[in-house]
Image (spheres, grey):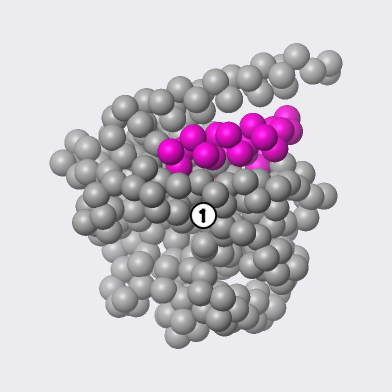
Amino acid sequence: MDQTEETLVRIIECPRDAWQGLPQMIPTQEKIKYLETLVSLGFRHLDAVSFVSPKHVPQMADSEAVMAELSRAKLPSGESPDIIGIIVNEQGLQRALAAPGVTTIGYPYSISAYFRRANANMSRAESRQLVEKIQRETRVSKRDLVVYISMAFGNPYSEPWGPEIVEETLIWLKDTGVRTVSLADTVGRASAEDVAHVYKAVKNCVAGVEIGVHLHSRPEGAAAKVLAAYEAGCRRFDGALTGLGGCPFAGDELVGNIPTEAILATLAARGVSTGIDAKSLALARAITGELREKYAAAEAAKPS
């Protein structure tokens, strides 16, 4: 990938988010092979694993085993990829820090009290204390940190919400030392207009902080949301090939991630290069499609 272009628009591929809600367990070696293939095709940033309770997210029970192999993967340039490991508590933090190859710790900080309890069983104060601890420990261990602001574009729980709450959270995160934040539409309810409105409202309140988006959407709304974020100034996008996945704690009907191919096509139409070429994208999409069809068929074949 061209480093100059890559610093302008950063694409984070999210297999972890794509897999975590699947009812069928993906064998560890199959995960490793898939992730290694993405790295070999030039996908520089992977949200690959999470260090959470197997009871709540059984698909991620093998994260240490996955990282033991993935830590040796190299990009075509010979560099190591950026691997994000998601954590929701201190136990997960220690597991992630001990895992080889995890270069970035990701933490979902929810501005929804209801969702915070459902996802991590924490109060606002407890969650903020954890962010402060994560920031200190990642700095000492020379890891990067990305904090996701869950419910950044609104929530379905009839709680107080507005761009001013997102802005206050961003300012607090910057004061804590966090330098990368992703605004998450956790339940996929934001319109393109909502995405543009919120991003424009908060983008200038924390100079020096990279603000990305982690959007969920139905397929027909994906491109409009990507374009809205880009035109509002966003240069960091999370996606998942074929749009698979979503948050298993957000509701019974999962809304998929923004398809990576939709992100790249939307940006290409604006003349923006991401460093992921068409051949690599086509190969990655084909492999992902095969994986998706395999596990969809297995689920459909299960006795009711």
Residue that appears at 27% across and 58% down: 7
Residue 177 or residue 230, whichever sits in front: 177
In the rendered view, would you say 196 is above or below 167? Answer: above
Q: Residue at x 57, y 59 (%)?
A: 102
Q: Residue 245: x, y in percent?
A: 57, 38
Magenta-colored span = 17-40
Does the segment drawn in magenta span residue 239?
no
The number of numbered badges drawn on the structure is 1
Q: Position of residue 116 (x, y in %)?
A: 66, 64
Q: Is 202 positioned to the left or the right of 96 in the image?
A: left
Horizontally, is 9 left or right of 119 in the view? left
In the rendered image, residue 23 lying in the magenta stretch gets the answer: yes
- Please say whether residue 114 is visible from this viewpoint: no
Q: Main secondary structure of the magenta part?
A: helix
Q: Is residue 265 visible?
A: yes
- Which residue corresponds to the image point at 55% horizontal and 34% vertical from the top-left? 34
Badge 1 marks a residue whose secondary structure is strand
Q: Quarter of the image holding residue 301?
A: top right
Q: Position of residue 93 (x, y in %)?
A: 67, 68
Which quarter of the rendering shows the C terminus?
top right
Query: Which residue is tagged 1?
Result: 83
Could you say which is closer to the camera, residue 28 or residue 203? 28
| Amino acid at circle 1 | Ile
Instruction: Tell me residue 70's x, y (percent).
Output: 58, 47
